Amino acid sequence: MQIFITGGSGYIGRSTIRALTGHGIGVTALARSERSARTVSDLGATPVAGALTDTDVLQKAAREADGVIHLGADNAEGAADIDRAASEALQDGVGSGPYVHTGGVWVYGDTDGVVDEDAPLSPPRITAWRQENEKRVLARAATGEHPVVVMPGLVYGRSGGLTQTFFVEPGRTAGAVPRIGAGSNHWALVHVDDIAELYVLALNAPAGSVYAGAGGQNLPLTDITRALSHAAGCPDKIDSLTLEEAVRRMGPIAEAFALDQQFSGARARRELGWTPTRLDALTELAQG
């Protein structure tokens, strides 16, 4: 089996290539620079030169593969249009082969306790555009194609991810880790290696399926930021921000960090046999 992946040199992508090759699956990976090409090559994938805006390249690489995992993201202006055009090209190329698209649980907004994929959607500004794109992706199941959407929770592990960028690194500089509000809201966490395994399993999921990639660790932000303060070298030093202050400092992503979300992840366990094994998030987050 040969899988084409976008975003392979990124944080989740690197773990996903490791997971794919660990299952004996061949990988080709989009690479927009020589550095990205070296990264995916070192992980055992064959680089394909191009960017998400190169729809002809995407379609050809997808056509030559047995399945596609779309992890890539372009944060430039017009991200929604770039993602839509890329996903259409990838689906056109792979045809009836499995196409696994990346969403994210932030589109659900605040949850009322622990919920699953059928909860109502109420996205913050930063992810509002995803709803329409994911609807278009899934609609192709009705015409004989094979779309699946994986919606990761807050991904951590391997000293990377958003927790490092927006909390640990600023904490090292300022001597205190930022926390939005009182910290009573929850984050639905998932380890990067566990979500990578879910992407592999999703290649065999029924067409039209949606899976919340949450590892069952729904932890309060106050506990998370305390752990991150140890990773930042300023144990228990917390800088409490209002949401308005956090938006000024971090940008609109602060609204997503302020969400109160708890997810079960039970559907992926039940239907795909997904078994997250990294279940001590606070210890790993504290180690950086």
Image (cartoon, helix red, strand yellow):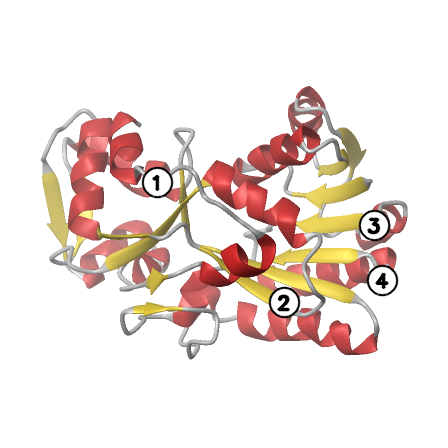
**Amino acid type at image mark 1:** Leu
Mark 4 and mark 1 lie on one chain; the one further toward the N terminus is 4
Where 258 falls versus 228 (above or below)?
below
Q: Position of residue 81 (x, y in %)?
A: 65, 65
Mark 2 and mark 1 lie on one chain; the one further toward the N terminus is 2
Residue drawn at x 71%, y 76% as measured from the top left: 139
How many callouts does the rendering have? Answer: 4
Q: Which quadrant of the view contains residue 280?
A: top left
Dot in front, 4 or 1 = 1
Image side of residue 26 versus residue 125, left or right: right
Task: Kindly identify which numbered label has been placed on residue 279.
Answer: 1
**Amino acid type at image mark 4:** Ser
Q: Separation of disc 4 and disc 2 at Cα? A: 15 Å
Quadrant of image for the N terminus: top right
Image side of residue 38 versus residue 49, left or right: left
Q: Which residue is mark 3?
A: 62
Mark 4 and mark 3 lie on one chain; the one further toward the N terminus is 3
Label 4 with label 3: CB-CB less than 8 Å = no
Image side of residue 284 versus residue 85, left or right: left
Q: Which residue is mark 2?
A: 209
Q: Work out whether residue 249 or residue 123 is closer to the camera in this orientation and state it.
A: 123
Dot in front, 4 or 3 = 4
Q: Which residue is mark 4?
A: 96
Mark 1 and mark 3 lie on one chain; the one further toward the N terminus is 3
Q: Separation of disc 1 and disc 3 at Cα? A: 34 Å
Q: Separation of disc 3 and disc 2 at Cα? A: 20 Å
Mark 4 and mark 2 lie on one chain; the one further toward the N terminus is 4
